[in-house]
Image: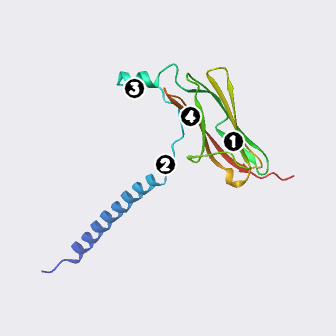
Amino acid sequence: MKVAPKAWMVLCVVILIMLAGDVNARRGRARGRTKSRMQIGLPITGKYRDPESDQYYNNNNGAKITLASHFDYEYVLGHKIAFLCVARGTPRPTITWFKDGVEIFSHLYLHVHEWYIGKDKVKSKIEIDPATQMDAGVYECTADNMYSIDRRSFKTDFSIAFD
C-alpha cells in the first residue's frame, strides 16, 4: 500500500493538532493544583436543610467573635506584632490561636494573654516581640463553645525599616 505525500502530510497535521489540544488540557488541570488549599476562616451562618443543624449553627448562645484585628497586616522586622480577638457566648467560649493551620502556644518571644469579661465574654491577645521573617503567615483566632465555632484570620507579611 502506497500513501500519497499529501495524505501523509494531512495525517501528520491532524495528529499534531490532537497532541496540542491534549497539552492545553493538561495545562488547564495543572493550574488548579497550584491554588492554595488553606481555607480562610469565615463564620458559619445561613439556613440549613436539617432543622437540628439549623438550631445548632444559629443558636443564640453560640460562640461569636465580636471584635478582631485587621485582616491584612504588614509589620516591621524587629518590632512588636499584636492580634486581638474578643468573643461572646454562653457558656463562655474558648479562644485558640493558630498560625498557618497549626495551634500556637506561648514561648519566649510569643505571649498569649486572656481576660474574662463578665460571664459570657473572653478577650485574647497574642504579642510577638521582636518580630522576625518567620512570623509572616496566616494567623487564625477560633472561638468555640458547645453550640458553635467562629473564626477570623489575619494575614501578615513583613517590611524592612531603614532608619
Tell me the residue that label 4 is attached to.
151
User: Where residue 147 appears, x then y in whole percent?
Assistant: 48, 26
Q: Residue furthest right?
A: 163
Instruction: Say which amino acid is labelled 2.
Output: Arg
Q: CA distance from mark 1 to mark 2?
A: 21 Å
**Mark 2 residue crowding within 10 angstroms, few (<14) / some (14–19) / many (20+):** few
The residue at the point 61 percent across, 21 percent down is 120
User: Where residue 82 appears, x then y in whole percent?
Assistant: 72, 40
**Mark 1 residue crowding within 10 angstroms, few (<14) / some (14–19) / many (20+):** some
**Mark 3 residue crowding within 10 angstroms, few (<14) / some (14–19) / many (20+):** few
Q: Earlier in the sequence, mark 1 or mark 2?
A: 2
Q: Is residue 46 visible?
A: no
The residue at the point 44 percent across, 24 percent down is 56
Tell me the residue that label 3 is attached to.
53
Tell me the residue that label 2 is attached to.
37
Q: Which numbered dot is residue 152?
A: none
Instruction: Say which amino acid is labelled 1.
Output: Tyr
Is disc 1 in contact with disc 2, using a CB cutoff of under 8 Å? no
Q: CA distance from mark 3 to mark 1?
A: 35 Å
